[in-house]
Amino acid sequence: MAAKKDFDRKDLKIPVSLGVIMDGNGRWAKKRLLPRSAGHRAGAENLKELCRNCGRYGVKYLTVYAFSTENWSRPEDEVNQLMKLFVEFFNKYDPELEEEGIRVRFTGDIDALPENLRKVCREGEERSLHRQKMQLIVAFNYGGRREIVQAAQKIASKVASGEIDPDDIDEQMLSDNMYLPDVPDPDLIIRPSGEMRISNFLLWECAYSELWVSDCLWPDFGYEELTRAFEAYTKRDRRFGGLSREDNK
Ligand code: FPP
C-alpha cells in the first residue's frame, strides 16, 4: 500500500534548490520487455508527480535533466520520440502545473534548437510567468561544459570591446553569465538508477551540492524515495569548505 503523504514534517530540512538526473527509463522498460519509448513515457509521467510532490514539500527551484547536449547521439528514432514526448508533456500537463502554481523555465542551449521546440519553450515560459509556488527548470539541450564555454564567450566579448578588464573576472561574474543566474545553486542533487556520476549536469553550479544516489529507476522514483532523499539531506552537515557545526563549538 502506498505511504500516506505528509508534506508538513517539521523534522525534515527541505532543499530550496533541487536537481534531479532522471536516469533509468531504458532499464525500466527493458525489465518489462517494453520499448525504450515506453520507459521515457513513464518517466515523463513521473516528472509530473515529482513536480507535485516537490511543490507541496516546499522546494522552490526544481531543475531536471531532460535532454543533454550528448543525447543527440542516441538513435534518431529515440531522439524523435523524446522530442515528441517533450512537446506533449507541456500540452498535457500544463493545467496541472497551473493548479500547483508551478512556473516553467528552460536551461540549456535553447537557441540551437529547431524553431518548433523553441516555440514550446517560449510559450511554456510565458504562460506560466505568474505562478509562484515553485519553478520547474527543465534542462534541455543542456551541457554543463557548454554552459561554462558560453559564459566564457560572453565575458570574452566584453573584454574584447573594452567594457571590462580581464582582472575584473571573478567567480561572481562567471555565475552571473550562466544561463539562469537568478536560480540558486542546487542544495541537493538526486540521481536515481545507482549511477555515481554527475554526467555534465550543472557543473559550475554543483560545486557545493550534496549528492544522493538511489537504486530506484527513474519511473519508479516516487514520494517515498523523495522523502528518503530529504531525510538523508536533513542529516548532512554542509560545510562549504569551512568547519563542521561540531568543530565550530
Ligand atoms: C535517461 O534514461 C533519461 C533520458 C535521457 C530522458 C529523460 C526524459 C524524461 C524523463 C521524459 C521527458 C522529459 C520531459 C521534460 C517531458 P536512460 O534512457 O538513459 O535510461 P537507461 O540508462 O536505463 O538506458
Image (tube, rainbow, N blue to C red):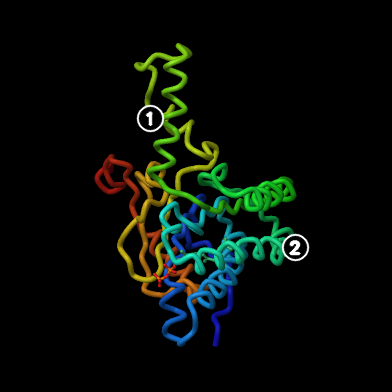
1 or 2: tag closer to the N-terminus: 2
Asked if residue 223 can be seen in this view, the reply is no
Say whether mark 2 is within 8 Å of ligand 1.
no
Q: Quadrant of the C terminus?
A: top left
Q: Please say if 171 is above or below 46.
A: above
Count up the numbered dots: 2
Mark 2 nearby-residue class (10 Å; few <14, some 14–19, many ≥20): few
Secondary structure at badge 1 equals: helix
Name the residue carrying label 2: 95
Q: Position of residue 78 (x, y in %)?
A: 50, 68
Secondary structure at badge 2 equals: helix
Name the residue carrying label 1: 171
- Tell me how far mark 1 sits from mark 2, CA to CA: 39 Å
**Residue depicted at 47% across the width and 14% down the height:** 161
- Give the camera-side residue of 90 and 48: 90
Q: Position of residue 240 (x, y in %)?
A: 33, 42
